[in-house]
Amino acid sequence: MFLLSAKRIKFLTAFITISLLHCYQPALAAGPPEPSIFTNPMALALLLVMALLLIIIGVLSAVLVGAADIKIEQKKKNGEIKQKVLPMIMLAVLLTSSGILQAQDEAPVEKVKTVSTIAGLQPSVFYLMNGVILLEFLIILALLVNIRLLIKKEKEKLTGLSPEAITELKRNKISWWGKMNKFKPASQEADLVMDHEYDGIRELDNSLPPWWLYGFYATILFAIIYLWRYHVSHTAPSSIEEYTASVTKAQLETQEYLKKKGDAVDENTVVYLPGADDLAEGKSIFQKSCASCHKESGAGDVGPNLTDDYWMHGNDMKSVFKTIRYGINAMPQWQNTYSNKQIAQVASYVKSLHGTNPASPKAPQGALMKEDAPATADVKQ
């Protein structure tokens, strides 16, 4: 059993203290322009952790030394031999610190290069501080192991049992996994054997493992809560309701996307929209905003007749779209009222009025233009 003597603990404490001072030396060696290590939040946090761990080491060391005076005296010789390693480590740390200070003092200012930092600390300082913290954790672990072994030895002495009896107790001792499963020790196996056997195979009357039993109870409780929440109180949406809501949301998002996509149309990319939905939407807008000048049939009133072969500003789809969007002369512009998609629908409806021969048409205006088959967008019916 490895025990930490009082002298060894003192050497470890001194080593950690010197390491803490070493963490501060690079910041001092860099000169006044470098910020102090004590102004860095990361450095302060690491120093605080090191100080707390050092206090824990001191407390555990005091407990171990006070409870194991005899053991420490017995291993004092070995301890003195091993203690020689720690002064050598501390001496190396001091020499390294002096070398860093001397090297930084002799370095010309113009040759100083920007050094990458970790959380505002020089890499050497950052890794050294974390190394000290790791060392402190290892020391605490060693102290705890020694205290546990010492207590275990003392308990065995107090029982007054023979080594054979202690071995038997260890054999019958149930592990933590056995306790979780309510395993019985091997000495009680005969009491668990059931009366029947088959082909030399016997069955033990063991209880269900507690973790399995409690897990089963938890599933029953979950089922009750689920049934009440989703099918009785309806305080949460059912799977069908969630599906319906997701479909509705997707449809709204699709409509919004198509609406924005339609606004990307302009007089250079517009095409005739022969779809029934597009023509119906165009007719609705036409009757609401255009019929006052062109009549609902497109025969013309204040505005020109839109059903004959005469056009004042062009009869192709792009020209009609441009006229509706920007307006011309007495024709108002509609770009601030309707989206480009809606204007394309109106233009398509206007093109669909050609040749309908409504009653009482207005006299032709503009130039005679031959009607060409308009370019159409691909529409899936």
Image: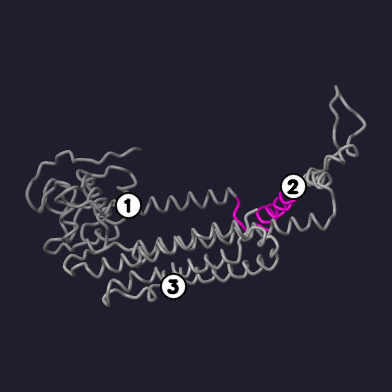
- Residue at (30%, 72%) from the top-left corner? 29
Which image quadrant for residue 137? bottom right
In the rendered structure, which disc, 1 or 2, sits on the residue that comes first in sequence?
2
* Quadrant of the snapshot with the C terminus: top left
Name the front one of labels 1 and 3: 3
Q: Amino acid at mark 2?
A: Ser
Report crowding for label 3: few under 14, some 14 to 19, many 20 or more residues within 10 A (C-alpha).
Answer: few
Query: Which SS class for mark 3?
Result: helix
Report crowding for label 2: few under 14, some 14 to 19, many 20 or more residues within 10 A (C-alpha).
Answer: few
Q: Which residue is mark 2?
A: 175
Q: Amino acid at mark 1?
A: Glu
Residue 108 covered by magenta stretch: no
Name the foreground residue: 116 vs 104: 104
In this image, 167 relative to 308: left or right?
Answer: right
In this image, 202 relative to 252: left or right?
Answer: right
Q: Which residue is mark 3?
A: 44
Percent across and percent down for residue 141 are 59, 58
Q: Amino acid at mark 3?
A: Leu
Distance CA(mark 1)–CA(mark 2): 78 Å
Report crowding for label 1: few under 14, some 14 to 19, many 20 or more residues within 10 A (C-alpha).
Answer: some
The boundaries of the magenta stretch are 211-238
